[in-house]
């Protein structure tokens, strides 16, 4: 009896484990397929030429160039002059996109850099980390339209994600979040705002304002369909 009982339990456990493994495997395949279908653009600069800018990127202004350091390539904006500079990349669309990037820079005394990811081209929306204000801000054109508390750590890599999705005709929803690389991504959007005006089609972007006089590094750019 005991042998039959143990044999039955072992058989049931094996079937249960097999079912779980099959479910997990199927889920992983579905997630991978979905992720692959959603990614529209990605650039980690691994194959980029040093001291150049990839051909699929449009520099609006600034001395952007790919650099190599400690086994990693990234796009770097010099620490001078102290102006606002940007780069466009990825597909041109009016809504339905999400852009993600990781950014690194350092403060100097009481001076801090400002950096952002953007959607809808030059005059579109930006999710901007403003360490001097201890805020992450949603900027429309040149106007700050929403903000949330954000504590930046000098020298760390910061993750930024901004998405714009169409809710209905004439109504868009902008959502953004920022977090330190290595920490858990916030489950909720830190910034969420409805816009009633149609947004012009434009390319995603990254922006840097080296107010601290130190370089700003950009890496792992990604454009996906908005969730």
Image (cartoon, helix red, strand yellow):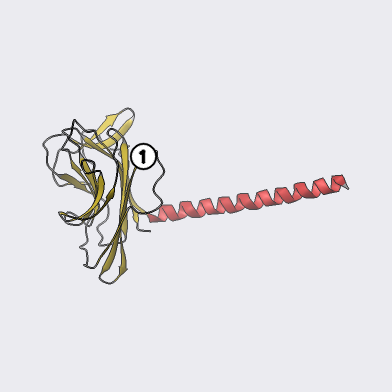
Q: Which residue is drawn at 15% across and 33% down?
A: 213
x, y percentage for residue 12?
A: 74, 51
Mark 1 = which residue?
181
Q: Can residue 56 be seen in this view?
A: no
x, y percentage for residue 131?
A: 23, 41
Q: Residue at x 27, y 34 (%)?
A: 154
Q: What element carries label 1?
A: loop
Asked which quadrant contains residue 199, the reply is bottom left
x, y percentage for residue 88?
A: 21, 49
- Mark 1 burial class by Cα count in 10 Å: few <14, some 14-19, many 20+: some
Q: In which quarter of the image is the C terminus?
A: bottom left
x, y percentage for residue 19?
A: 65, 53
Q: Is residue 109 visible?
A: yes
Q: Which residue lies furthest to the bottom in this view?
A: 169
Who is closer to the viewer here, 95 or 43?
95
Asked which quadrant contains residue 108, the reply is top left
Q: Residue furthest top?
A: 70
Q: Which residue lies furthest to the right in this view?
A: 1
């Amino acid at each position: 009896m005991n042998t039959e009982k143990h044999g039955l339990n072992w058989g049931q456990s094996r079937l249960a484990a097999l079912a779980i493994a099959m479910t997990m495997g199927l889920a992983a395949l579905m997630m991978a397929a979905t992720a692959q279908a959603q990614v529209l653009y990605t650039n980690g600069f691994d194959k980029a030429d040093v001291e150049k800018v990839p051909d699929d990127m449009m520099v609006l202004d600034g001395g952007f160039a790919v650099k190599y350091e400690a086994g990693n390539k990234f796009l770097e904006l010099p620490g001078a002059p102290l102006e606002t500079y940007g780069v466009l990349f990825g597909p041109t669309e009016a809504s339905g996109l999400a852009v993600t990037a990781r950014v690194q820079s350092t403060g100097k005394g009481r001076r801090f850099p400002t950096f952002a990811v953007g959607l809808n081209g030059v005059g579109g929306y930006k999710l901007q980390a403003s360490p001097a204000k201890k805020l992450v801000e949603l900027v429309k054109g040149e106007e700050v339209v929403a903000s949330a508390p954000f504590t930046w750590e000098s020298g760390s890599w910061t993750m930024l994600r901004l998405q714009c999705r169409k809710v209905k005709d004439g109504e868009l929803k902008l959502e953004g979040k920022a977090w330190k690389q290595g920490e858990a991504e916030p489950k909720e959007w830190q910034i969420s705002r409805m816009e009633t005006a149609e947004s012009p089609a434009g390319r995603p972007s990254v922006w840097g304002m080296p107010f601290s006089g130190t370089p700003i590094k950009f890496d792992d750019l990604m454009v996906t369909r908005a969730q």
